[in-house]
Structure formats: structure tokens, C-alpha cells
Image (spheres, helix red, strand yellow):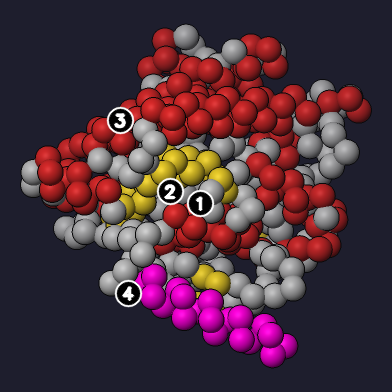
């Protein structure tokens, strides 16, 4: 106990130095999809698309009301911007927060809120966003429903239009962005989900991976050319473990389709292929831009580590692959009774679940992932290790 307290004091002293004038990250700009969206989808979708994410019980854990985040509380970028130090013998998502120190960055506003103050950064991420432009999916009739125009390229366009509010000259912008932390992703989950939903085979879905990764790499390079010096590029989570995918593909019902955890093999193989190619693309960009820090953030293994040993993380084994908020069924996900709809209820303790609504994760899971990205081992290199003094 004495060693823990001493370590805590020293570590917080270190963080106090980082969070004062020596803090290198003065702002944060994020691009992505619903895993880090802080309100853009809710603003953009209504009234064209029926939205349930702006209704209770979304936001129940932290905000006490829907906040635009597609979770029960905060999402990854909320924890990254406001560093929380969790102490304990086991790095679990359900440990109490016994000490905290902030880097000085506020909770990021969604870009479509049109805030007058963008000095600390903006979140451009939108639920449902794709790496490949949505026109591609429309032209090829891959999707049969309305898509929002919210792809990675569109988000970069929003960033370009907002630049005059952030900086006035090319030199000023480059200086400003060199001290910011950029997130590019996660991207790819929606691209692959659209193709899976169109009834394509694993080989057909895999054929999209190089194009998706290329789009992400091009976006990273574009931001580097704008002056970005620190970029976090998350990979794909194991989408074959999501209650929604497990339910939608339950008709397959063959043992060989599932791994030892109960996740879908083919979907997770595509996710791993994506992550492998993305790592390679990041490696090539590091060689091309040796003075830029590009961090690969592992979204896959944090989820798998919880599902492999759920009781270690305060999750009941049977609930590892079930949604906290849903309309019933084996995985507590029902397309006709999704979270937010009248009569659909949430579990009493979201922190004891990995998944929130069948697709997205609980605040507790996001906290665990963000801790692994900030301090390791789920980032290469860990985000806090690159802060310059």
C-alpha cells in the first residue's frame, strides 16, 4: 500500500507537469465514426433518418441524459482529452477512479454544433461514417437504405472549411497543428458491414480492405501535409463479437463459423486483415515522414482480452456477448427493438457489460481501451510516451 501511494504521488506529480505549460498537446482534432462521435450523427441524421440515440437510456452513466454519444456515457476521445489515471492491481474497466489529472483539454464538441470556440479542438466523427465515399456504395447498389454523406473525405472537407476559424496563415496553421493530437479513425467497420449485409462472401469483403486502408493512409498523409505531427490511427475492433452481427448472422448456425469465445470467425478474420494492412501502411508513412509520430491504436485486442476472461473484468460470462441495452434474444439485440425505442430497457449496471447497444461499447469498455492507448500496451507507441517536455 505504501509503495502504491508513493508511486501514485510521483506519477501524479509527473502528470501535473505535463498538464501545465509544458503540455505539448494544445488541442485535439478527431475524425471517425460512431465509436468516437460526440453528437454529429444526431444532428446530421434528423429528420432524414429516424434517430433513437438522442433518447434515454443513452448517456445514463455519466451525463444522466443523452449527449449525442452513442454509449451509456463517455467515449474514447473523452478519456484521451482528459487523462484519467486508474490505479489498482488489475487494469479493469470497472475499477474506481481514485486519482485524476487533466491535460487541460475539454470534452470535444461535435463540429456540427458550430461552436464559436474551436481553440481546443473539434470532433468531426459521425456515426455510420465510411472510409470509402458513400457514393460508391450507392452506385454499386450495395446498400438499400439512405446513407448520410459523412465519409472520411467529407470530414476532411469540414476540417478545411473550419481552418480559418483555427488559424490565419499557412505558417500559423502548421505551428498550431504541430502541437495538436489528431485521431484518424476508427474507419472501416461500416464499410465492411455494408458489404457483409449485402450477402457477400468473406473473400469479397476482404477485397475491399486494401482500398479502405488506402483511404485512411491518404487522410493521414493529407493531415501531415497540413502540419500534423502527432496522429493516432486506430484499427478495427473484433466486429464478429458484436451482438448485432451475431444476431444478424445467426442463421449460419454452423460450429465452424464461431471461435472459442463465440465470435464470428469470418468477420474477425477481415478485421485482423484490415489491422495488418493498416499497420503496414503506417510503417510506410513513418519511413516517409520520420519526424512525424504516427501511433497505431489497437482496438481489437482490448475487447478480446475482456471476452477471454470476463470475470476478471467484472463481466458475467453469459453477458460478454450480450448488449446491455436491447430488445431481447440470445444476444439482447433485436433490429425491431433497438436501444432508445419505447419499451426497450437497459441493464442496471452497464459497467458489467462490454457492449452497450449491440454495436457500440459501454463507457467502462471505452475507459479500458483509452487507458491502454494512453499508457500501453494497446498502442504503438503509447500516446503519453510521445509528449515532449
Q: According to the image, label 1 marks what residue?
A: 70
Numbered disc 4: secondary structure: loop
Disc 2 to disc 4, how far (Cα)? 27 Å
User: Element at badge 2?
Assistant: loop
Per the image, the residue denoted by label 4 is 20
- Is residue 358 toward the left or the right of residue 17 in the image? right
Mark 2 and mark 1 in contact? Answer it, CB < 8 Å.
yes
Residue at 54% x, 67% y is 60
* Residue found 39% across the figure and 28% down from its top: 288
Relative depth, front residue between 288 and 309: 288
Q: Is residue 229 above or below residue 275?
A: below
Q: Quadrant of residue 155?
A: top left
Cα distance in 3D space between marks 3 and 4:
30 Å
Looking at the image, can residue 272 be seen?
Answer: yes
The boundaries of the magenta stretch are 1-20
Please, which residue is most extreme toward the right here?
A: 255
| Neighbour tally class for label 1: few under 14, some 14-19, many 20 plus, Cα within 10 Å | many
Q: Earlier in the sequence, mark 3 or mark 4?
A: 4
List the residue tagged with mark 3: 222
Q: Residue furthest top?
A: 140
Q: What percent of the width, then of the height, locates residue 329?
A: 78, 45
Mark 1: which secondary structure? loop
Above/below status of 231 relative to 13:
above
Residue appearing at x 71%, y 31% in the figure: 268
Nearer to us of marks 3 and 4 is 4
Q: Is residue 191 magenta?
A: no
Label pair 2/4, CB-CB below 8 angstroms: no
- The disc placed on residue 37 is 2
Mark 3 Cα shell of 10 Å, populated few (<14), some (14-19), many (≥20): few
Q: How many marks?
A: 4
Amino acid at each position: 500500500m505504501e509503495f502504491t501511494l508513493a508511486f501514485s504521488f510521483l506519477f501524479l506529480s509527473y502528470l501535473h507537469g505535463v498538464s501545465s505549460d509544458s503540455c505539448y498537446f494544445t488541442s485535439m482534432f478527431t475524425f471517425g465514426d460512431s465509436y468516437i462521435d460526440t453528437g454529429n450523427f444526431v444532428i446530421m441524421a434528423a429528420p432524414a433518418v429516424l434517430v433513437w440515440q438522442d433518447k434515454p437510456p443513452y448517456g445514463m452513466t455519466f451525463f444522466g441524459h443523452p449527449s449525442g454519444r452513442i454509449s451509456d456515457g463517455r467515449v474514447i476521445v473523452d478519456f484521451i482529452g482528459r487523462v484519467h489515471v486508474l490505479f489498482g492491481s488489475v487494469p479493469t474497466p470497472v475499477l474506481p477512479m481514485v486519482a485524476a489529472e487533466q491535460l487541460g483539454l475539454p470534452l470535444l464538441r461535435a463540429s456540427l454544433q458550430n461552436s464559436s470556440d474551436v481553440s481546443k479542438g473539434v470532433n468531426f466523427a459521425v456515426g455510420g461514417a465510411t472510409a470509402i465515399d458513400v457514393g460508391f456504395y450507392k452506385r454499386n447498389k450495395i446498400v438499400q437504405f439512405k446513407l448520410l454523406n459523412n465519409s472520411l473525405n467529407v470530414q476532411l472537407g469540414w476540417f478545411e472549411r473550419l481552418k480559418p476559424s483555427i488559424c490565419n496563415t499557412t505558417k500559423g496553421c502548421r505551428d498550431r497543428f504541430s502541437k495538436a493530437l489528431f485521431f484518424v479513425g476508427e474507419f472501416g467497420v461500416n464499410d465492411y458491414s455494408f458489404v457483409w449485409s449485402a450477402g457477400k462472401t468473406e473473400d469479397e469483403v476482404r477485397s475491399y480492405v486494401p482500398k479502405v486502408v488506402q483511404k485512411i493512409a491518404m487522410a493521414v498523409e493529407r493531415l501531415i501535409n497540413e502540419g500534423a505531427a502527432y496522429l493516432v490511427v486506430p484499427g478495427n475492433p473484433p466486429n464478429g463479437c458484436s451482438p448485432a452481427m451475431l444476431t444478424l448472422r445467426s442463421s449460419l448456425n454452423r460450429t465452424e463459423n464461431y471461435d472459442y469465445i463465440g465470435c464470428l470467425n469470418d468477420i474477425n478474420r477481415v478485421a485482423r486483415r484490415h489491422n495488418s494492412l493498416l499497420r503496414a501502411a503506417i510503417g510506410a508513412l513513418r519511413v516517409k515522414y520520420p519526424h512525424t509520430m504516427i501511433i497505431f491504436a489497437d482496438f481489437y485486442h482490448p475487447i478480446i482480452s475482456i471476452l477471454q476472461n470476463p470475470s476478471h473484468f467484472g463481466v458475467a460470462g453469459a453477458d460478454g456477448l450480450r448488449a446491455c441495452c436491447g430488445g431481447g434474444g440470445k444476444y439482447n439485440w433485436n433490429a425491431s427493438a433497438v436501444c432508445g425505442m419505447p419499451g426497450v430497457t437497459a441493464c442496471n449496471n452497464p459497467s458489467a457489460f462490454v457492449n452497450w447497444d449491440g454495436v457500440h461499447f459501454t463507457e467502462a469498455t471505452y475507459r479500458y481501451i483509452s487507458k491502454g492507448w494512453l499508457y500501453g500496451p494497446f498502442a504503438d507507441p503509447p500516446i503519453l510516451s510521445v509528449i515532449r517536455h
